[in-house]
Amino acid sequence: MSTTWHVLGAGSLGTLWATRLARAAVPVRLIVRDSTRLQAYQAAGGLTLVEHGAELRFPVPAETPDSQAPIHRLLVACKAYDAEQAVAQLAPRLAPDAEVILLQNGLGSQDAVAAQVPQARCIYASSTEGAFRDGDWRVVFAGHGFTWLGDASHPVAPIWLDDLDAAGIPHEWSTDILTRLWRKLALNCAINPLTVLHDCRNGGLQAHHCEVATLCGELIELLERCGQPAAAENLQQEVERVIHATAANYSSMYQDVNNRRRTEISYLLGHACKVAARHQLNLPHLNQLESRLISRLHSLGLPSD
Ligand code: NAD
Ligand code: KPL
């Protein structure tokens, strides 16, 4: 019998992973916030995956964080700003051989989690899959994509990648996961805040070519200074390609703001500005972008951290 996957966070990505693992008969358990949520989940009778218009329900067993059983494999599917605290409450349950897989976008939360659980092997992931909730305990698989996983301190791939094969989760083990995460962070910094500030789809940034190019120049300086030259290669061309390829889409940050949800700004642009300051690197346009975004979030009554 293979090791049970504990999935922390029954949101979009957590449900997308849990349902696909369950579909492949891989043992999986869901960890929900508290007994109220557990009762609501049990009343719903499981997690529903909506794919290509078809709905399938999986009665994935669930528990609360204060359940007693040891955890050997934990998939953390919370937002970046919730991850550290959510994992901290599970730390006493982590077995000595525990592995923790972190699905958070941006950077900063993964290191904060790793510091909470020094006994565990922490694996960082970067995903281009897209999913959203259309109701409680339901996920719509909106964009097929790919997930890279890696461990910056240990290049050997874990055996449980077989579970992902079985579950049909497209993935690759990456020996340069930090480069991937920095590259994605740079793309997100060049695109997402501007879509909020200009109130536009990604394609709307084609009218702000100079602003995008200036930001890319500063992001390249940052990536080179913090030891990520590969993440800086052809950044501007890649940003322009993504703007073109996703012209009709709203960025994830735009969607968060539009739905009045907290953004992950501190782990994207905020992280970039913090690392630049740590390296005493003056990046005026990036800093100004952060200030403008924070002001916009304040004016909308949304958190800016
Ligand atoms: P989400 O808001 O849909 O889900 C997060 C879930 O975690 C929520 O259900 C929340 O209640 C739960 N949670 C938070 N704290 C908890 C705790 N202490 N105990 C139990 N549950 C807790 O978020 P999401 O869209 O799935 O995103 C998760 C991460 O994945 C983010 O960093 C996001 O940027 C990244 N990501 C998302 C997508 C996507 O398409 N949704 C794609 C790529 C990356
Ligand atoms: O990842 C993205 C997002 O919206 O978060 C893209 C489409 C690359 C824009 O930055």
Image (cartoon, rainbow, N blue to C red):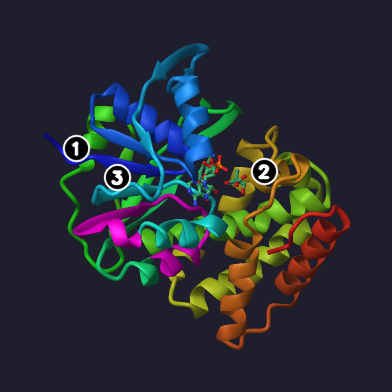
Where in the figure is residue 269, as x and y percent of width and height?
Answer: 64, 64
Other-residue count near label 3 (Cα within 10 Å), few / some / many at <14 / 14–19 / ≥20: some
Q: CA distance from mark 2 to mark 1?
A: 32 Å
Do the residues under discs 1 and 3 have CB atoms within 8 angstroms?
A: no
Residue 259 relative to residue 74: left or right: right
Q: Mark 2: which amino acid?
A: Ser
Instruction: State the residue in front, 78 or 161.
Output: 78
User: The N terminus appears in which quarter of the rendering?
Assistant: top left
Q: Is residue 211 magenta?
A: no
Residue drawn at (84%, 64%) of the image: 295
Q: Is residue 104 magenta?
A: yes
Q: What mark, if any, has residue 172 been given in the picture?
A: 3
- Residue on which disc 1 sits: 162
The nearer-to-camera label among 2 and 1 is: 1
Magenta stretch, residue numbers: 91-113
Residue most extreme to the left: 1
Instruction: State the residue in front, 239 or 197.
Output: 197
Looking at the image, residue 145 lies above or below residue 257 = above
Q: What mark, if any, has residue 251 been given in the picture?
A: 2
Q: Secondary structure at mark 1?
A: helix
Sequence-wise first label, 2 or 1: 1
Q: Secondary structure at mark 2?
A: loop
Q: CA distance from mark 1 to mark 3?
A: 11 Å
Ligand 2 near label 2 (Cβ, under 8 Å)? yes
Residue drawn at (47%, 62%) of the image: 84
Q: Mark 3: which amino acid?
A: Glu
